Image: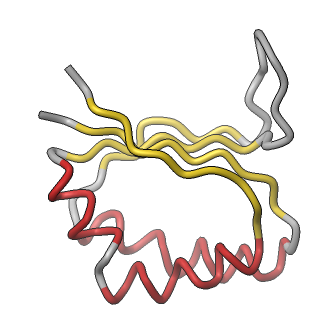
Amino acid sequence: MAVYAIAQSRVTNPDQFQHYLAAAGPTLDAHGVKLLALDEAATIIEGESSYPRLVILEFDSTEHFHRWYDSPEYTAARRHRLDAAVGTFMLVQGF
């Protein structure tokens, strides 16, 4: 069953975040991750959010997600994101 990783963030260090993008991008292709949506200023219809950036990734399964997320390549990239942005990252089960 497909799962979706949803990241909401606010970039606090744009230069460092560029290092994250450069390192993380190739890991998506290498692991067959589908980038479904990326919006630098998502429109909030209801409620509030202090995280304007939204990314939705699709994975074939939870195991597939963890193979990517826990891979040495993404682990190295993730350090840059954690130093460059604040936000939330969640995994949602598909139907």
Where in the figure is residue 24, as x and y percent of width and height?
48, 73
Looking at the rendering, which quadrant does residue 95 occupy?
top left
Position of 94 compared to 43: left or right? left
Q: Identify the residue at horizontal 16%, vertical 46% (top origin).
A: 61
Total numbered circles: 0
Q: How is the image coloured?
A: secondary structure
75 over 45 or under it: above or below: below
Position of 22 compared to 60: left or right? right
Where in the figure is residue 85, as x and y percent of width and height?
76, 66
Where in the figure is residue 66, as x and y percent of width and height?
25, 65
Position of 6 compared to 44: left or right? left
55 over 22 or under it: above or below: above
Where in the figure is residue 78, as x and y percent of width and height?
53, 77
Looking at the rendering, which quadrant does residue 22 occupy?
bottom right
Which residue reaches farthest top? 46
Q: Dividing the image into 4 quarters, which one contains the N terminus? A: top left
Q: Identify the residue at horizontal 33%, vertical 89% (top origin).
A: 72
Q: Identify the residue at horizontal 64%, vertical 41% (top origin).
A: 54
Looking at the rendering, which quadrant does residue 32 occupy?
bottom left
91 over 33 or under it: above or below: above
Q: Identify the residue at horizontal 35%, vertical 73% (top origin).
A: 27
